[in-house]
Every structure is written in structure tokens, then in C-alpha cells.
Amino acid sequence: MAPPPNRRPGFSRRAQYTTFFGYIAGVAGALLGGVLLVVAITNPAAFSGFRSFGSDATAPAAGLAARTRSASYDLFGAIGGYFAAGQQNARLKRELAAAKVRLVESQALAEENRRLKALLGLADNNPKPVAFARLTGSSASSTRRFATLSAGTRDGVAIGMPVRSELGLVGRVLEAGHATSRVLLVTDGESVVPVRRATDGIPGFAQGRANGTLQIRLISLGINPLRRGDAFVTSGSGGLYRPGTPIAIVDTLTRDGAVARVLSDPAATDYVSVEPVWAPEALSPTLPASPGGPSQRRPPRP
Amino acid sequence: MTLLARLSRSLTNRFRANQLNRVPSPLLAHTAPWLSVMLASLIPAMPVIASAPVLPPFGLLLLLAWRQVRPGVLPVWAGLPLGTFDDLFSGQPFGSAILLWSLAMIGLDMIEARFPWRSYWLDWLVSAGLLCACQALGLAFANAAGGSAALIVIVPQLATAILLYPLAGRLVSALDRMRLLPIVELD
């Protein structure tokens, strides 16, 4: 049915005022939203208190949702496992045999490493994680990539701390509430992580593209030495992220770098660890930034 | 959604048997639209940890559906409180949903005055346009606040949102039936 062309609801003065003030309130709401938006854009931390309060309030429900999510992943994994069991078994046996040899080798290397470090008087700087927690939610409908972490200031989480899973870097803490905190995922456009190629240490930085991939830009411009499948780890330059944390694998090459897939898909992670902020004060400036350096570049592809 | 409609219909039938001397609960009748939009705002935040914007804006979807299926249940200023709630959880800069949802409510009202004889396709088209405008402006606001996402990133979620809109309308009509179930006995 079409609404009446005349918006006047009748002769009741009260009803007329209600309609009128409804429109006034609607326009006022839009104006207020515009003002709040300008404040939020100029000062991004302005409303963090409200957001922390909101995520603290919904933390129990979010925790339940997170447990359900990880349980359903396990279920699908278990069902999928039946289909490829025999093939997988044979492959795993081969891999296990190879891995046992590598394990002995790496134990020897670790021992040698420890001995040499003791000789140099270097402390083993593997700090203990601040907290272990679940990622309980994310901004799945926004183009910004934030996640909610089920640990806050009461667990010792502070702003700026890197968050990682066992597979690689996930992001860093942006706002810390009492029981929850907000994590800026590495795939967000605002997140820039200094990285280096794992094999030879070519430096660059990885910026999020908001669609689950990272744009890797190399610092030394020129011939693009990257190949598909190259692994990148954090370089630790500038502090914040501890060096050597895996982050991404190159997927497609671009003119000045590559588009890389993130190693630790936040959807598949169950628990993440929050690490203390890495401050590179122990590094002396004479220490070589990367083993090998840029002189060991691979030759360009034909 | 058909399941939901059937459930609500069976519930309605069950209550119809002893419907005499009963009225709808005023509390339920008045809060159901607000609560359903707020719950829908929470949905994208909860079940998945997405590394890309994959889920449609359920809150906005349900708000538009309520406004089109049952005009008058939510007032023109509903964008202010509901947008505030959505901004707490959406990850957008604070104020984005307040502004966009308020403008969408006013815009819907103006479109309704301009095209009084509405139809299924016109409703769908109008809300598709509003969804596109809100998401594109939301992207612009998010980019102004520090993000750097391309427009192509929101295309999948927009397609999902537009295709889901008729289902959201069905959901709202089912909720509307439940909202007005006569469950409170008169003395």
C-alpha cells in the first residue's frame, strides 16, 4: 500500500510533533555521526575505551564462539583425514625418515650454536611469551583487519606487543582492554612489517592488502630477485617484531616486489602467544644486518 | 529461512489454539526489531577470524529489511543508536555506521515518498543501492583512518549482501510474526 502523500498523521498535535522530532533526531544523528567520524579519523585512539568496554562485555559469548569454531575445524579435519589416510601414511613415513636425519643434524648445530654463543658471551634472547590466548573475533565485514584477543591488561598485555601463532606472525596489539584486546592483523593496510628473505636476508617490508595477502616491497630497487615460494621472516629492524618470525610466502611477482600469502592464517589458529615488544638495544651497529647481504643475490631469471 | 518461517508458523498455530484472552507482550513487540539488528551487528565479529572482508554487513542488511518490510516499526533516528552499537564491533572508525545508517534511514524515507507504489524488485534495487553506497563510503572512511584497501576488496561481500537481501526480508517477516504472538494472558 502506498503511504499517504501528506505526512501529517492526523489532527493530534502530539503525533505531529513525534513525526517532526523524529526527522530532526534523524538528521541530528547523521550530523553527530559525521563529527564522531572526523574525531575518530584524526585521533584513532579516541574511542578505544568504548570499544574495549564492548568487547569485554561480549567476551564470554565470543569465547564460546571461538571454542565452537576450533571444534568444528577439528571435526572437518577428522572427516577429511579418512579419505587420504593410506596415501598420507606412506608419505609421512618417508618424511619421518628424512626428518630424523635432519633432527640429529640440527641438534648438533644447536649444540654448536649454543657453544659459540657462550664463547661470545651473548645471552640467548628468547623471551618468554607474555600470554597465551585465543583470537575470539574479527572485523569480518569491514575492510580494516582487526581481531579480538581474549587477553587484556590483567594478563599483562600492553599496546604494541607482537602476536604470533606457532605458524608465524599474526599481528600486533593495538588497543588493550581489561580482559580483551584488539589486534591489528598483518593483512591490514595500516600494518607494515620489516621483513627479509629467509634464505639470504634481502630486506624489504610487507604491507597488508586487506584481502588476506601481503604486498612485499624490497628496499633495494632494481632487478626483482624474488621467486615464487620464497619464504619471508621478520627482520627486526626498527624493533617491535622479534627477528626470525616467519610471516609469508611469495605467491605472485610484481614489478617492485611480490604479493605473498600469509603463513599463519588467523582463521585456522587456535591459540596465539603475545610476545613482549622486541627492543634491539643489545645489537651493536657494527653487526651485519643480514647474513650474506645483498651481494649474494640470485641471478635474474631469463 | 523457510525453516524459520515454518517454525514461526507452527508456533503461531500452536498459540492460536489458546489465543483467547491473550495479547502480545509489549516488551517483546517493542524490543525485537532493535535486538535483532544488534545481534546481526555482532554476527560478523564472532564466528570467523577472517583475513579478508568476507561477510556481508548483517546489521545494515537487517535494518534496511525492517524498514522496508515493516515501515514505522523502527523510527527515522534508529540509525543513531544502532549505528553506535555496530561501530563498537565492526572495526570501522567510530561514527562511520552512525553517519551512514542515519543517512540510509533518511534516504529510504525520501525514496518512499518519491516512489509511493513499491514493489519487490524496487525494494531490492533500492536496498542494493544503499548497501553499495554504505559499503563504498565505509571503505573510504576506513581508508581515511589509516587503511589502504582497494575497492575490489568489497565486491564479494557486496554480492553476498545483495543476494541475501530477500532472505533478510523473509527473516524479518518471520521475526515480525513472532514479535506479535499473543503470549501475555489478560486478567
Image: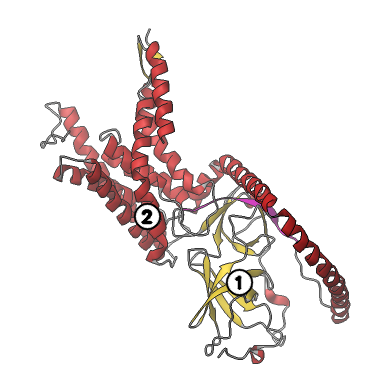
For residue B111, side relative to residue A282 (left or right): left
Binning the other alpha carbons within 10 Å of mark 1 as few (below 14), some (14 to 19) or many (20 upward) gives many
Tell me the tag on residue B158.
Answer: 2
Residue A136 magenta: yes
Task: Identify whether A221 is placed above or below B98.
Answer: below
Task: Identify whether A17 is placed above or below A196.
Answer: above
Chain at tag 2: B
- Quarter occupied by residue A129: bottom right
Amino acid under disc 2: Leu
* Residue occupying the point 43% across, 68% down: B148
Q: Main secondary structure of the magenta part?
A: strand
Tell me the tag on residue A169.
Answer: none
**Where residue A79 sits: x, y (%)?**
66, 47
The residue singled out by tag 1 in the image is A249
Q: Residue furthest top?
A: B187
Q: Is residue A28 visible?
A: no
> Where are the magenta residues, as a range?
A128-140
